[in-house]
Image (cartoon, helix red, strand yellow):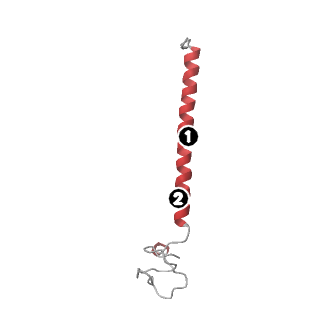
């Protein structure tokens, strides 16, 4: 468990206040403290999602360009 305010390690603390900054916490209520690594997982999820959106956007753009070139070719609308 980590303090939400200062990041102090709260494992083994006998009081219900952070010894570093005084912020109250309840070891039985998850919203009053942070688990180690939770922020790291969030960053990974956001990064993977962003990459997926970027790849999908670029792929869609390339596909539409390819299909448009086929249509122009079929219609005899080539450049030369």
Q: Percent from the top left, x then y, of residue 16? A: 45, 85
Measured along the vertical axis of the image, is residue 73 above or below residue 25?
A: above
**Up-down: is 1 above or below 47?**
below
State the residue lying farthest toward the bottom: 14
> Disc 1 marks which residue?
56
Q: Residue at x 55, y 34 (%)?
A: 60
Crowding at dot 2, Cα within 10 Å, few <14 / some 14-19 / many 20+, comes out as few
Residue at left offset 55%, top offset 85% = 12
Residue depicted at x 52% and y 58%: 43
Residue in the image at 52% along x and 54% along y: 46
Where does the image place residue 11, in percent across and percent down from the top left?
A: 55, 81
Mark 1 or mark 2: name the one nearer the start of the chain.
2
- The image quadrant that residue 71 belongs to is top right
* 52 in relation to 6, above or below: above
Residue 34's mark? none
The CA distance from mark 1 to mark 2 is 20 Å
Task: Assign a secondary structure to mark 1.
Answer: helix
How dense is the environment of label 1, judged by Cα within 10 Å: few (below 14), some, or many (20 and up)?
few
**What count of labels does the image hold?**
2
What is the number of the mark on residue 43? 2
Secondary structure of the residue carrying tag 2 is helix
- Left or right: 47 as drawn, with respect to 32: right
Which of the 4 image quarters holds residue 38?
Answer: bottom right
Residue 9 in percent (x, y) is at 52, 78
Q: Quadrant of the C terminus?
A: top right
Q: Position of residue 18 (x, y in %)?
A: 45, 82
């Amino acid at each position: 468990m980590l303090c939400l305010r200062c990041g102090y390690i709260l494992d083994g603390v006998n009081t219900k206040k952070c010894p570093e900054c005084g912020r109250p916490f309840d070891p039985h209520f998850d919203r009053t403290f942070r688990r180690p690594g939770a922020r790291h997982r969030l960053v990974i999820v956001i990064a993977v999602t962003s990459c997926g959106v970027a790849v999908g956007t670029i792929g869609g753009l390339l596909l539409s360009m390819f299909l448009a070139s086929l249509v122009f070719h079929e219609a005899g609308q080539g450049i030369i």
